[in-house]
Image (spheres, helix red, strand yellow):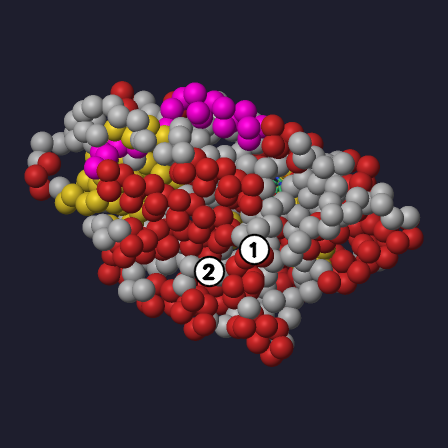
Amino acid sequence: MPDGKHHNDIETLDAVVIGAGFSGLYQLLCLRDKLGLKVKLFEAASGVGGTWYWNRYPGARCDSESHSYSYYFSKELLEEWEWSERYPGQAEIMRYLNHVTDHFQLRENIQFDTRITAARFLEAENRWLIETAAGERVKATYLVAAVGCLSSANVPDIPGRDSFAGEWYHTGEWPHEGVDFTGKRVGQIGTGSTGIQAVPVIAETAAHLTVFQRTANYSVPARNGPLSDEFKQYTRENHDEIRQLIQSTPNGHPFRISEASAFSVDDQERLALYEKAWEVGGLRFRATFQDIGTNKAANDTAAEFLKNKIRSVVNDPETARVLSDIDHPYATKRPPIDTNYFEAYNRDNVSLVNLKTAPIECITANGVKTSEREYPLDIIVFATGFDAMTGTMMKMDITGRDGQSLKQAWSAGPRTYLGLQIAGFPNLFTVTGPGSPSVLCNMPVAIEQHVDWITACIAHMQEHDYATVETTESYADEWVAEVNRAANATLMPQANHSWYLGANVPGKPRIFMPYAGGMAHYRNICEDVAKNGYEGFVMRKSGAEIAAE
Ligand code: N01
């Protein structure tokens, strides 16, 4: 992006926030109302919602329980809003985020339909020059990337894709008007959390649904349903307690992980506990024993229980075998939860294709062709996930100090300090960036912690008249080592095809991206860093280098 000669014409702001999802909306509110800054939020979509704006696929629903999938910073907001189901559906989350936007009158500071394509740090001014796809430019002292972890759709580049004569859609870029599957032959590629939600709903109206499975996956019933009046009353009367709970658990969810080992009980009791957890349903299943995520033998007991459940639900033995032929420990990939996923394979109009034995060769005008045969289709649904955690950042042309691009800085994988800042990119903050608990946590909890920290950091800078804040290479190196250490203390790296590792995108460097050390522990680290004068973040007054202290 050329520097341009007409800087005087360029609007100059205190801060620019990119993205109007959970993180961007709260960040805008904090910078505008708490710090009194002049802020503008740019959003590529025509409305708020972030990932929920785009992910309108059939069955789209959050896997976090609704009473924990909320902002907790405002008592008023908590008192005003009531969720209707155990897990909030996409449309209800959109209503919630629109309600928040209107409640705090955030819309007036948001520019919709505007994609940020480039940002360059102007060293002479200590400001970012930010450019939109339409060529509009603004300058801002602070740039906050609230771009979401799962916002860059991964449509696999399968040979012949564009020759397909029917319609195709990616779940993460779903048309607003919906897709009518009635009487259609539908093929769905992908059986991650999204695919598992979509299958039973698509199957209800499609003439036939063919599911193309590359890696078999575990799933636990969500047990969704309307919230009872008693539960609604409980949440209304216990906001403080729930906040305290979700802020003190390792994953930000409203349940505690058992402290017992899977081997502290005998086989019969273990089975009974798994049965109970299966009946309760949801992500809580992981919390049945403390060592499911860290001890392979303990994990095997959960994995075997879940594989047996698949075999008991699915009638056709060969389909059951392919669905339960899972090659990684339970919860080493993000564990899906479902509503009648495995049951859907008992329908006459649903069939499974095992891509492990017959990989997709190409897409033809007629449908999908594997090494065994061609499947004629009218619609292909790509439930193939995202270029997660880094994709959206890397698509922008971001240039820091000394002309260094983000693409160069992250060529071997993302390097941040605490997932908050990148060395060489002053005054740029990433909300739930790689290297933070982010996707291993119930997102709103991780988001509120990051936004509060960033807001406090900027307040500190304003108070002390600092012009720039920037982490260093050595702190980033140490933190990357800590992120690796934390991942290696779990079984998660054993799922070597996981998007946590970037393995789902061809050519993407393999590095475990989220911080697996636990949200509560991470929160303490961030608080200590701030208390110690933002240790690891160098703050400078314009010109002179001065330690943050
Ligand atoms: O994506 P995924 P997702 N040929 O990457 C397959 C969150 N989420 O959209 O495993 C054939 O998990 C791929 O196969 P494999 C949640 O954090 C949250 O489902 O790579 N298949 C896999 O089966 C989740 O983890 C909610 O072998 C191909 C699937 O596509 C994250 O979003 C709800 C392929 C992709 O699974 C992403 O989930 C839904 C190819 N070329 C999702 N490429 C909530 O409730 C990929 N696949 C909050």
What residue would you read off at disc 2? 72
Whole-percent x, y for residue 90 in the image: 51, 62
**What range is drawn magenta here?**
465-484
Whole-percent x, y for residue 488 in the image: 65, 29
What residue would you read off at disc 1? 246
Whole-percent x, y for residue 77 in the image: 41, 68
Query: Which is nearer the eye, 342 or 530?
Result: 530
Q: Relative to residue 253, is residue 16 drawn left or right?
A: left
CA separation in Å, label 2 and label 1: 10 Å
Looking at the figure, which quarter contains the C terminus?
A: top left
Callout 2 touching callout 1 (CB < 8 Å) = yes
Task: Kindly identify the residue that appears in the image at 28 percent across and 65 percent down.
Answer: 105
SS for callout 1: helix
SS for callout 2: loop
Task: Kindly identify the residue that appears in the image at 18 percent across and 24 percent down.
Answer: 543
Check disc 2 and give the amino acid type. Tyr
Q: Relative to residue 112, is residue 229 drawn left or right?
A: right
